[in-house]
Image (cartoon, grey):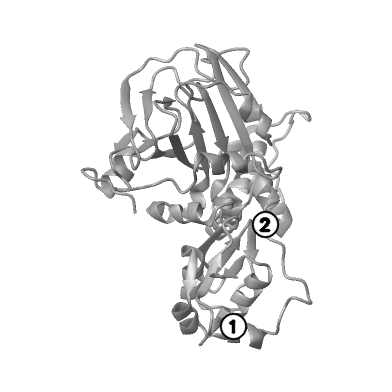
Amino acid sequence: MIRFNDTTLKTFLTEFWQKKPLVLRNALPNFESLLSAEELGGLSLEEEVESRIVIQKGEKDYQLFKGPFTPQTYEALPDTNWTLLIQGVDRLIPEVADLLNDFDFLPRWRIDDIMVSYAVKGGNVGPHFDHYDVFLLQAAGQRNWKLTSKECSIDNYIQGVDLRLMESFQVEEEFTFQAGDILYIPPKWGHHGVALDDQCITYSIGYRSYRGQELWDSFGDHLCETSAFKALYVDPTWPENLNPAEITDTASQQAQHLLQHALQDDNLIKTWFGRFATQLDQQAAQQLPEPLTQEETPSLENFIGALQVEVGLIKDPVCRFAYSHVKNKEGQEHTLLYINGAIWNTFEAHSDFISKLANQSFLTQEEIMQATEVEGNIKLLFDLWKLQYLIFID
């Protein structure tokens, strides 16, 4: 876990998370970037990798270019004032995905991805604010950060620029960051980071933001897909001499009560939100591994044999796992597993094993052998291995 130094984890969660920024010096001691500038440049040449280059040409003049790029792209860049950004690096590089283990003090399903940027001296993406939480880890070189809480509104932006940048940026705080330092920034806080040398690499651990409309639409889709809301609208007691075209208060209130009934169903809300929170975006869905073919798939017995000699199983970094405890109509509690937006068949695996599988990025051979006492545990592992959502650790 990252070091909070003089700030305790409890203080961070209660006083800073989604409220105000926090500077964490040497949060990851002796940290060295897991990727070089050259390796990041190599990723930007690949078709399936989401990459961008931002060049600052003047005080409020920025140009945005989208990859994939070519070697000639880099030959044409100026000596200063440009930044390369690579999205979803945790889905591409296992060592970068491992970095997320240091942030397990927050739910893993809240994380969006890790973006990695490389900047030459003066490189930056302009003063801006986001609608999501982010931890900015300085991985190499130095970067100057300026922060503001003022005028973080949608109408404060520079017109004619492809990036959503703040026209007015009143600096309230300023810091210089070195490798291992982390800056936490909550939603709607302005920030502006400028590279101070040609070795500047920054990792952005970004968290998902949920808009109310997005939640509402998703909940409606869940109700349709699961046929979980079949209650009928019931009229109020109509008055005599009504106006035949009027929507009365009592009529709309009846509709409101019907909708509230669904919203007050704890199990229904929990199962929907489990699917919603683990749903993949379009880019991630395209990066899911190819499942094993029928010819490549051994018998369950052979799979069990392999488990006894392999080091363990590790999750594919694209996949999103979560679980919840719900009660059936008889009041008995059971555990639901959610993977990539679906309620998963657990094959009656043990509840403790389901939670362990969801919580951890990998399972050791010892943990797997302990789980073999329950047949459903092994069937669940076999099912996920066939899809390559779990693979053997090298």
| Residue 197, quarter of the rendered image | top left
Q: Is residue 357 left or right of residue 179?
A: right
In front: 328, or 187?
187
Residue drawn at (63%, 20%) of the image: 162
- Does 78 appear above or below 198? above
In the image, 231: left or right of 139? Answer: right
Residue at numbered disc 2 = 288
Query: Can the viewer see residue 339?
Result: yes
Please, what is the three-letter code of the amino acid marked with disc 2? Leu
Residue 39, how many percent across, how many down?
Answer: 55, 44
Label ID, residue 306: 1
Q: Residue at x 53, y 67 (%)?
A: 314
Residue flagged by tag 1: what amino acid is it?
Ala
Residue plotted at (37% across, 37% down): 184
State which mark lies toward you, 1 or 2.
1
Residue 32 lies, with reference to residue 60, above or below; the image says: below
Query: Is residue 253 in sight in this rendering?
Result: no
Relative depth, front residue between 330 and 120: 120
Rate crowding at label 2 as few (under 14), some (14 to 19) or many (20 or more) other CA atoms within 10 Å: some
> In the image, residue 251 lies at what x, y percent?
67, 38
